[in-house]
Image (cartoon, helix red, strand yellow):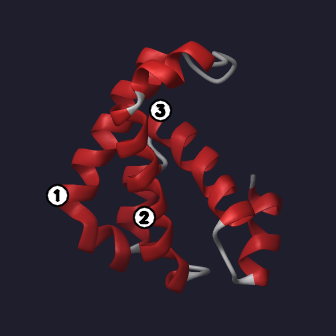
Amino acid sequence: MLFPNEIPEFLNHLQKFCNHLHERQEGYEKLWNARLMHFERWRVTSGYILQLLESKRSKLESSAEAFSNHLFFLDYATITVNQLTKYAETECYNQRFKLAVPMFF
């Protein structure tokens, strides 16, 4: 894992985003740009990510294989990459991580 210290904070960010999306889905849906995927698919996938975070959080934090196998699988990857980019831009203080994320995505 390139930046293992960032994983717990990123997972917190991802969980916050998914919860916020579900709590305020009507507002999100009205402003949604379906360029990546339709809102309903995004909402459902974010619900699956929330379930995954609740059931496998410690494994996702400790295993690079679990992190990549679960969060970069099919539609999960779209949300993960989107939020990883936002996390690097807005919440992360690790400058090397901030520079690395755009190079990967």
Q: Do residues under tags 3 and 2 come within 8 Å of each other at their CB atoms?
A: no
- Residue at image x 78%, y 82%? 95
Q: Amino acid at mark 3?
A: Asp
Q: CA distance from mark 3 to mark 2?
A: 17 Å
- Residue at image x 75%, y 59%? 104
Q: Amino acid at mark 1?
A: Ser
Q: Amino acid at mark 2?
A: Leu
The answer, for residue 74, to whether it is visible in the render is no
Q: Is residue 93 above or below residue 77?
A: below
Q: Is residue 32 above or below residue 22?
A: above
- Position of residue 91 measured from the top left corner of the image (x, y, whole percent): 64, 68
Identify the secondary structure beneath mark 3: helix
What residue does disc 3 label? Answer: 75
Q: Is residue 67 above or below residue 80?
A: below
Q: Residues within 10 Å of mark 3 (few under 14, many from 20)?
A: some
The answer to which of 26 and 9 lies nearer the viewer is 26
Q: Is residue 44 above or below residue 11?
A: above
- Residue at image x 41%, y 42%? 20
Q: Earlier in the sequence, mark 2 or mark 1?
A: 2
- Position of residue 77 measured from the top left corner of the image (x, y, whole percent): 52, 42
- Position of residue 18 measured from the top left corner of the image (x, y, whole percent): 40, 43
Q: Do residues under tags 3 and 1 come within 8 Å of each other at their CB atoms?
A: no
Q: Does 50 sit left or right of 79 as displayed?
A: left
The answer to which of 11 and 102 lies nearer the viewer is 11
Q: Does 48 sit left or right of 85 as displayed?
A: left
> Tag count in the figure?
3
Residue 11: mark in rendering: 2
Q: Does 89 sit left or right of 39 as displayed?
A: right
Q: Residues within 10 Å of mark 2 (few under 14, many from 20)?
A: many
What residue does disc 1 label? Answer: 55
Identify the secondary structure beneath mark 1: helix
